[in-house]
Image: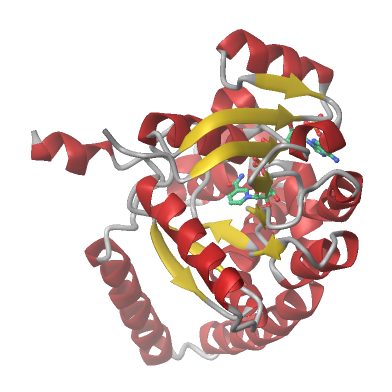
Amino acid sequence: MTRPIYERLAVVGCGLIGSSVIRAAREAGVVSQIIVADASEAHRARITELGLADKVTGDIAEAVAEADLVIFAVPVQAMGDAAQAAAATIRPGTTVSDVGSVKGSVAEALRAALPESVFIIPGHPIAGTEYSGPDAGFAELFRDRWVILTPQARDDGPYLEAVTRLSDFWRRLGANVERMDEKHHDLVLAVTSHLPHLIAYNIVGTAADMEEVTRSEVMKYSAGGFRDFTRIAASDPTMWRDVFLGNKDAVLEVLGRFTEDLQALSRAIRWGEGDKLFDLFSRTREIRRGIIAAGQESNEPNFGRDRGKH
Ligand code: NAP
């Protein structure tokens, strides 16, 4: 029988990611008890109905009081207030983490709000879908996906032990764990996730605003590439507003580079420089092949590999 890693897990914000953590943690037997705090009354009712937690409350202070692991899974800009609400009751020695898509500003907000006696280890599972809320979550979401932890530069034993324990927790949920500096995380994710979302939001917005092409034509002929952008552009507006506000510097830096490269492409098209276009499109094809080789090509949960084991 597998032993739990934590006695009591408190998840603050039980939407897609929070409820997936809970489902996966329960399935893996890594926690004995689960407490949820969520601001939404409708979500609380649904979480109770689904039997996801041992206790469901709207009061963050109450939820974290007995926990030895607290995971904040609210939108990035709500992390600071949620942590402040937890500060008065959280116990010394509690491990505090989060799942926010931005790390620098979230880590700062957690450190500013919480007492020094807790172990703050920010985290980000690189896994998700375009859906939100407690019904959207599933236990397999993190299987074979990366979870990036951005621990503080501390070398005291208890903190390092807390980092090891949290890494074990994620591994038992099926994830691969990597440690990274929070600034570097924000730059990497600006390239791999935040900019692609910005481009998708923009391209779908542009198509919707074009007067010469009707909306029904856009939908009818969407298989020409547009359809893939619409999936990304259907992602939660609150979450993504917060990501761009929370990772402003890195996104603007990457956007600057992107704009320059786009100018170069438009120049190549204007001057008929086919070789330049062909070279770029060949290089990008290699990146796609690398993603497939790394097993990260699909958003679908990785049920397949497990099935193959039986
Ligand atoms: P979600 O499905 O909308 O869930 C967030 C939940 O938190 C909702 O139930 C929300 O209620 C609740 N909430 C909001 N503010 C709160 C507060 N101050 N106190 C307590 N509960 C609060 O969002 P999600 O997709 O799970 O995202 C959660 C976090 O995971 C975000 O930080 C996001 O950046 C990160 N993340 C998301 C993905 C993804 O693909 N979605 C992937 C990796 C990481 P209301 O709906 O009533 O606001």
The residue that appears at 57% across and 13% down in the rendered structure is 50
Using the rendered view, name the quadrant where residue 12 is placed. top right
Q: Does residue 150 show up?
A: no
The residue that appears at 91% across and 47% down in the rendered structure is 88
* Residue 8 point in image, percent of width and height: 60, 36
Considering only vertical position in the picture, is 247 above or below 123? below
* Residue 87 point in image, percent of width and height: 87, 51
- Colour setup of the view: secondary structure
| Horizontal side, residue 26 vs residue 191: left or right | left
The residue that appears at 72% across and 84% down in the rendered structure is 253
The residue that appears at 79% across and 79% down in the rendered structure is 249
Q: Quadrant of ligand 1?
A: top right
Considering only vertical position in the picture, is 76 above or below 52? below
Query: Farthest residue in the top direction?
Result: 49
* Residue 101 point in image, percent of width and height: 65, 59
| Horizontal side, residue 105 vs residue 151: left or right | right
Pick the residue in front: 208 or 284. Answer: 284
Q: Does residue 76 show up?
A: yes
Pick the residue in front: 187 or 148. Answer: 148
Q: Quadrant of the N terminus?
A: top left
